[in-house]
Amino acid sequence: MKLTEICVQRPVFAFMLIMFLVVMGVFSFIDLGVDLFPRSDPASVYVRVRLPGASPEEIVSQVVLPLEESIAAISGIDEMRSMINEGSANIFITFVMERDIGEASEDVREKVSAAMRKLPPNVLPPTVAKQDPDSEAIITLAINGDRPVRELTELADKTVRRALETVDGVGGVDLIGGRLRQINLMMDLNKMNGYSLTAQDVQAAIMSENIEAPGGRIIRGPSEMGVRTMGRVDQVKDFDNIIIKNIGGAPVRLRDVGHAEDGMAERRSFAYYQNKPAVLIEVRRQIGTNTVSVVEGIQKRLASIAPQLPPGVKIDVIKEQATYIKASVEALEEHLLLGSLLASIIVFLFIRDWRTVLISSIAIPTSIVTTFTLMRAMDYSLNSMTLLGLTLAVGIVIDDAIIVLENIVRYLEEHDVDPFTAAIEATKEISLAVLATTISLVIIFVPIAFMTGYAKRFMNQFGWTMAMSIMVSMLVAFTLTPSLASRMLKRHKKAPGDKSSGHGQHSHHASWLDRVYLGTLDWSLHHRWAIMLLAVGVFASTYWANKYVGRDWMPQEDQSELGMWLELPEGSSLDLTEKTTMELSRKIEKIPGVRAIVPGSNTFNERVNGSFVTILLDPPNQRAEIGAMGQKVREVAKEYAWARPRITFPNILGGRDTFAPIRAQLLGPDIRKMVDIAKEASQKMMADPRLADVKANLNLNNP
């Protein structure tokens, strides 16, 4: 090959060619993002709409159906589902994998705006977001201190929340356990009856009087002035002066039938941290963003917020996903380095020549590092799939260099030529075999990158990473390997009378490994049918063994964390939910291996009869395995069966409640019949000892 000849004759060219690729790979490695898996989120858009006071049936007919009819016209929708509660509805639109999240969200926003004229006039403006509110928070914070809940809530809402919402990649920030400031109007029912007033009269008066409205403009010759009606209340006491109604020519003011107070919103959630009331902040990322970079951005923003907090108030990080992801990636990187080192050691054990081992081992770092450049160009990240591909490639990328180097060494032993000539001629001779070997490996891995469906998001990066590293190894074998061999290998001088060649006896003393191998090879060649029958038997046994191999999409990872959902009977108050949750939390905290408990309200569906408990565990080497810990929590929660406790394990794909290992949906025109079917199916599944935490996500028992 002409390229090989140039690299042997011009070693600086070969060195600079490979160093150019390596330097680019080093800088590309610095810019690569870190994540647990490739971007596997489908384009999911979330629409939230509220109609205060409306029943679920009314919301379905007047709000959800018009919105679904309008949104359904968007192309590329894979799934659309709705979750309806009293006074609110959540619509989840999942698009096909190929759909861009930005374009999808804009299309949904346009369709929702177009459907607004079909909705009731008192419906609140819908919220459209590029996030899945059912996904797990990437970081959970707790604001606590020796301050009233109202002050902590104001700090969480006005200072922390607004700062975190500006971090790149943040999709939503939710507060749990807070009570926002609210101006409450306390009315005297007897006085209102005396004036024949209703609560709607007071509401209409406040809405019409507490406003600032444009009043046009005044033009006076060469000057022009804008006019505004300044009617907004500046102080709480000014609410008492608002005129509600004129009766008999006399104004009836708010102070005549009640008074205004600077208070707090109604308590509809709770949260505790270290057994003390706190305000929890859950941060969720946007669909398709990098978890580690978002968490790092949040932590930097928290560091700038900390000096602004009053004395005695602090922000604690309860949990975050970045540490687990970085630890997993660092473990894979460690395996990659160890694999490279062990591959070189194995080669040395067989070749037993440090020059040959050094030349062939250089192919490992050069091929791996150069692959980082192509990963950066294709917008890949350092994740489990790409690092898995590079780890597997360690034992493959060295093959081309060994093949070329072995042929060069053979040339030096069999022909009386100098290393320069041996490097050129031997590489030319073996180039077609190396090319065929490389292409055969690439053909194996490239089709993996073209898999379809959900698996494509994971296997695409794995297939391309493997193929790219193998192609780079071929370039190294044709350039740097012969160039180094021509200068580092020495000509083997034959002893007088030694006429052996590669077709004769071996030039080295046979070891026990050689004798075992040659004996096995000789027996196999004389018993070909036995070898064929053995191969067919091994292949056929795979069909039998296949029945006993379990199947799962992702293994259960131990993230030193558990979750527990509680759903008390319909009609339960917040006080009962809080009391039950705290009682159960204190008992769980006594289980060996439990580090901390963080109970709080379930803010997803805004119902006071539900709660969620985060159970933080000790490191895996200091407790039982995650499955056993979950069973211990179930044993403690048995006496609270009436609260329907359900244990959840963190999902490495980021799912929360609806991402249960087994999930089924019932579809039909009659909701009442579906309820009966769901209850019957749930009872039968509960009787199966192999299933746990069976739950039907439908309840029509709200009084």
Image (tube, rainbow, N blue to C red):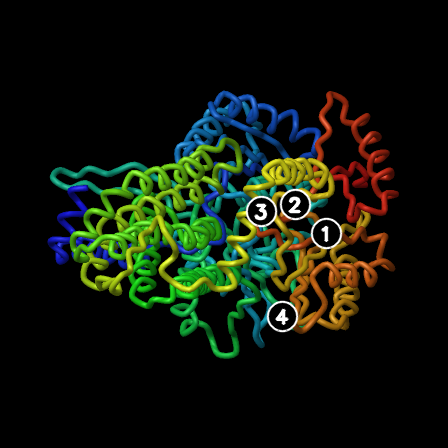
Under circle 3, the secondary element is helix
Q: Quadrant of residue 620?
A: bottom right
Q: According to the image, label 1 marks what residue?
A: 610
C-alpha distance separating marks 4 and 2: 32 Å
Q: Residue at the spot x=29%, y=42% of the render?
A: 227
Q: Which mark is residue 523?
A: 3
Q: Residue at the spot x=79%, y=66% of the render?
A: 583
Check the image and report above or below for 603 versus 444. Answer: below
Q: Which mark is residue 605?
A: 2
Split into 4 quadrants, where in the image is the N terminus?
top left
Q: Which mark is residue 619?
A: 4
Q: Residue at the spot x=58%, y=30% of the render?
A: 80
Instruction: Work out whether mark 4 precedes mark 2 in sequence or the reverse, and give the earlier one.
Output: 2
Q: Nearer the viewer, residue 471 or 608?
A: 471
Q: Give coordinates of residue 431: x percent, y percent.
A: 27, 42
Q: Nearer the viewer, residue 488 or 116?
A: 488
C-alpha distance separating marks 4 and 1: 29 Å
Q: Give coordinates of residue 380: x percent, y percent.
A: 38, 47
